[in-house]
Image (tube, rainbow, N blue to C red):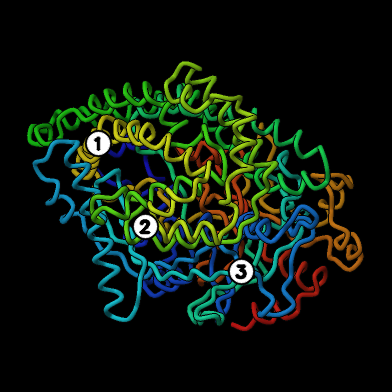
Amino acid sequence: MLRTLSALIACCAMLPAWSDEGMWTFQNPPLAAIKAAYGVELTQDWLDRVRTATVRLSNCTASFVSADGLILTNHHCAEACLAEHSSKTESLLERGFAAEDRPHELKCGTQVADVLMQMEDVTAKVSAATHGLDDRKANEVRKKTLTELEQACEDASRSHGTPLKCESVDLYEGGQYFLYKYRRYDDVRLAFAPEEDIAAFGGDPDNFQFPRWDLDFSLLRAYEGGRPARTPNHLRINFTGPAAGQLVFISGHPGSTDRQLTVAQLETQRDIDLPQILLRAAELRGRYIQFGKTSAEAARIVQEPLNTLENGIKVRRKLLDALHDDRQLARKRREEAVLRARIKADPQLARSVGDPWRSIEAAQRVDRAIALPYQFLEGGAGFNSRLFRYARVLVRAAAERAKPNGERLREYTDAALPRIEQQLKAPVPVYPELESLTLSFGLERMREWLGPDAPVVRSILQESPDELATRLIAGTKLADPEVRMKLWQGGAQALAAAHDPMIELAQRIDPDARAVRHRYEDEVEAPVQAASERIARARFAVLGTSVYPDANFTLRLNFGSVKGWEENGVPVEPFTHLARLYERATGHEPFKVPERWLAAKAQLDPATRFNLSTTNDIVGGNSGSPLIDAHGDIVGLAFDGNIHSIAGSYWFNPADNRAVAVDPAILLEALSKVYRAGTILEELKAN
């Protein structure tokens, strides 16, 4: 297996035994490890085909599965699109959706599909620009340099007739910088999604559990120029699925891991960040649940945000549990101590690296001191409202667009503006009653946590949180996308003339929010970034790129095998079967089987495999990732992990960390016998 960091440093060499740990970049895949562990030698053609068939959605991963832009992903990755086309009286989450034909596919207004085409190492350029600068100036210059590199990349691609979306990527905590160049499809439509009762069977009680029986899949389609995109480089689905013990790969976009953070940074998460977020989220969940019980309409309105919130609560609760595992933190401390000892033993390395851990510890003290105002003001926790988020974007965009591109906040550079505009003009439904609930909740918690005498609280809350939220939601016109686009196009002058109360609130709190952000960037972000880069240099001096970088929602490849585990001495088999779905059904949510599944029961093969578990190392963001065999065929669809996988944000335990996927056998059974989706099946099989 890949030895722990301390053993690697102590031995200063890679050892021949491997585990399935690692989220590897496509420019540095673990080819030797795969061959050593499984006897399989991947070719560059295989890597290129998988890379260009893997899709990054705005919130998940997916893959092209036909020559006409058909995209396979999870149902929960399409939830926002389903909610976008739902109403108080009808929910596509409840009844599912199947387009009669391509003209009837539903546009997902805020969705994009990105395909990684090229990767350019720009580390030398960034290092040259920041060389010799103090931490704060280096942080400022680094951001400006990355903005300039991104814009030059996009300009060059347009001049060559192949427009690309260029994004800077920070690997190894600043040890490397790349430009990732994507082909972007900003017209994504929904072709098929099953009912939520079968897609998320078991609901929150089953979430992050295994065995599972979830048909967590949906089909989207990428369009170009109003026509289905031509995607000749796509993956074939092998509906037979994988065998136990078989080598499988996951190509996807893991959202974030914190495996390379220092102990001081992990302790800040444990003591400050996670407890505060969990307290707020738990109370908001209670309000959501009570709101949903007031009427059938309210239940439909709150369905999608409640699902998202409950998932987040379970993740953060288990992350907090992981950080209270004294054995694991002790191991992290030993790894740090060994690395620091190796640095000290090399005088030249010691002079170049210094003591970055001390710098990070000092920055964490500032982070802890400003955590609350940062979360409530800049993070927006005090203004929990879609309408407020629109207002903030409009206010900040008007201010930032007046500046030179390199001097703007990074989220408002020219390269970022098309995506902002897409989101502003999307006709996403806004429900005033839910907006009032979330906004008043945010205002109440801000008053409680910052204190009623905090200047920003006193300036805003001259009335009760409920009264202010009700007045703001009733008075704003930002629910109308046409209004938003007029304000976007009109800039500061249009905002001033609008006299919109939500815009005025965003303008009033912006100086305070910017001030705490500025302090965070100067006193936390800048020294941590500089110190992390020095730690990365030390790791490279000892290990090179024989270890993988933390996840950051960029494309990664992982290898593993179909395998169960042992839970409290009891073996957990790697496959579940259809028959058990009906045995677990109670007729009541979240263990309710949809009517069409009850009607089709006699025609279905009860032995059909439903879900499976593997040793692949994944985290959030990998949802919708294709599970691929050595031939490059899809043999599963990743949608979750078991409860032990949540700690994988910090460390990987090969004994019980498991990914969970939909078996292709149940996709075939469902599409052919339950949904009678012959046209879709023909397209999926036409490879």
Task: Name the residue rendered at 17%, 42% in the picture.
Answer: 138
Task: Name the residue rendered at 25%, 36% in the picture.
Answer: 526
Please give the residue where the numbered disc 2 appears in the rendered image.
25
Name the image quarter holding residue 538.
Answer: top left
Q: CA distance from mark 3 to mark 1?
A: 41 Å
Label 1 sits on what residue type?
Ala
Q: Are marks 3 and 2 in contact (CB under 8 Å)?
A: no
Residue 315 point in image, percent of width and height: 57, 37
Under tag 1, what secondary structure?
A: helix
Image quadrant occupied by the N terminus: top left
Q: Is residue 217 above or below residue 631?
A: above
570 and 311: which one is in front? 311
N-terminal label among 3 and 1: 3
Q: What is the crowding at mark 3: few (fewer than 14 residues within 10 Å), some, or many (at least 20)?
A: many
Q: Is residue 314 visible?
A: no
170 and 110: which one is in front? 110
Label 3 sits on what residue type?
Lys
Image depth: mark 1 or mark 2 in front: 1
Q: Are marks 3 and 1 in contact (CB under 8 Å)?
A: no
Residue 383 point in image, percent of width and height: 53, 36
N-terminal label among 1 and 2: 2
Under tag 3, what secondary structure?
A: strand
Please give the residue where the numbered disc 1 appears in the rendered image.
526
Q: CA distance from mark 3 to mark 2?
A: 32 Å
Under tag 2, what secondary structure?
A: strand
Please give the residue where the numbered disc 3 appears in the rendered image.
107
Q: Is residue 83 above or below residue 672?
A: above
Residue 22 point in image, percent of width and height: 42, 49
Task: Name the residue rendered at 37%, 62% in the picture.
Answer: 26
